[in-house]
Image: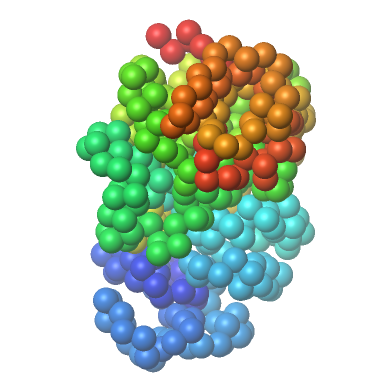
Amino acid sequence: MAKIKIGLFGFGVVGQGIYQVIRKAKNANAKIVRICVRNPDKPRAVEVDRALLTTSADEILDDPNVNLVVEVIDDAEASYDIVKRALIRGIPVVSGNKAMLAHHLPELIEIQQSRHVALLYDASSCGSIPVIRNLEEYYDNDLLLEVKGILNGSSNYILSRVFDHQESYAAALKQAQELGFAESDPSFDIEGYDSLFKLVIITVHALGVYVAPERIFTYGISTIHEADIRYAREKGVKIKLVAQVVKVGEDSFTLFVMPEFVTPDKYIYSVDDEYNGVVIRGECYDRQFMFGKGAGSLPTASSILSDIMARLHDYRYEYKKRNYLRTPDYTTDITLKIYVRYRTTDVRSILRFERIHEQYTSDESNYLIGSISLAELIEKRQQLSGNDVFVANIPIFFLGSDR
């Protein structure tokens, strides 16, 4: 069995985790031979031979000894350039960059197929949870109905502190930043984009269809208010940031990311702190639940190690549903039931509700619950971005089938 010689791009938190787990794994049969970094002199928690470090991507891509590129940098455009160049040269790649993959996956799939080279990226979607591999191998049929879950650990940590520890949103966000679960600019996580990019990738393997991120309704938790938290507690539910792709007909599906009122009988109700949880539902197997740490140095590194080990056996994604099954069409012509809390923004004049089920008015804030088309939400997304507005999903799919 030939030894895998890795050219590693990125030596931050995840890159250092990869270095550690490869050294710990006795059967990995892999070795990091070069590491591309921006600043070789930067202090790092993990000691490494400086002779391994380079600032030149070409030194790795032109090195005939490198037979696998592992890319874990935080710049999506630089990531795209490295991955594309490596694949074109016939070098297989393992990547963890969800933003890059979500925007460029169709092109990268074509390059893989034309160059007969592999790109693996299980770590991009849920850290240590092997969602992609399971969708690709175990759920490689047309019986899958839904993939739904908590895909972002930072936002989930914040909401867990709010609902399980009665902390304010602001205090929970600050604590998440202090612990390193959220960045100093947390918008990527709390606005739902991290979950969105993961959902785009998951959908390719769940249903065989690519939907560009800008076509998907995405709404985060940054404008959550004490009134929303109080409402949820009164109803005996929690608010979670949930990503969902679901078949809504024989030949159609939809997907979106938004806060959701989650009842205690749902699996994801008990997914707390920085953990992720994914429910996979099918026609004949009901629900499967996957749970684990969705981010962090060693959990993500362990997922990347799994992809590295898969390359020992020449594993690659076959994209079976794209190639062998009739794929469904993406639709936004569906009706959702939503909760909208607002104060001064004239939500009633912005949104065309098909039906209003409940409404409440007070000096502090107002809310209404109504049925509305997903297409309408996408069209009016920017008008719902004010700080005095919060939108949450009230689930309507598969009601009564979880008991």
Q: Residue furthest front?
A: 363
| Corner quadrant of residue 327 | top right
Image coordinates for residue 353, horizontal then vertical, percent: 69, 21
Is residue 26 visible to us here?
Answer: no
The correct choice, above or below, for 240 with respect to 175 in the image is above
Image coordinates for residue 351, horizontal then vertical, percent: 70, 29
Image coordinates for residue 30, horizontal then vertical, percent: 40, 68
Q: Residue at x 58, y 57 (%)?
A: 99
Out of 65 and 76, give the one closest to the viewer.
76
Q: Residue at x 30, y 68 (%)?
A: 20
Q: Residue at x 35, y 44 (%)?
A: 169
Q: How many marks?
A: 0
Out of 394 and 264, give the one closest to the viewer.
394
Out of 140 and 165, give the one closest to the viewer.
165
| Corner quadrant of residue 114 | bottom right
Is residue 50 visible to us here?
Answer: yes
Instruction: Name the image quarter holding the C terminus.
Output: top left
Out of 118 and 180, give the one closest to the viewer.
180
Horizontal side of residue 248 vs 300, given as left or right: right
Instruction: Name the image quarter holding the N terminus.
Output: bottom left
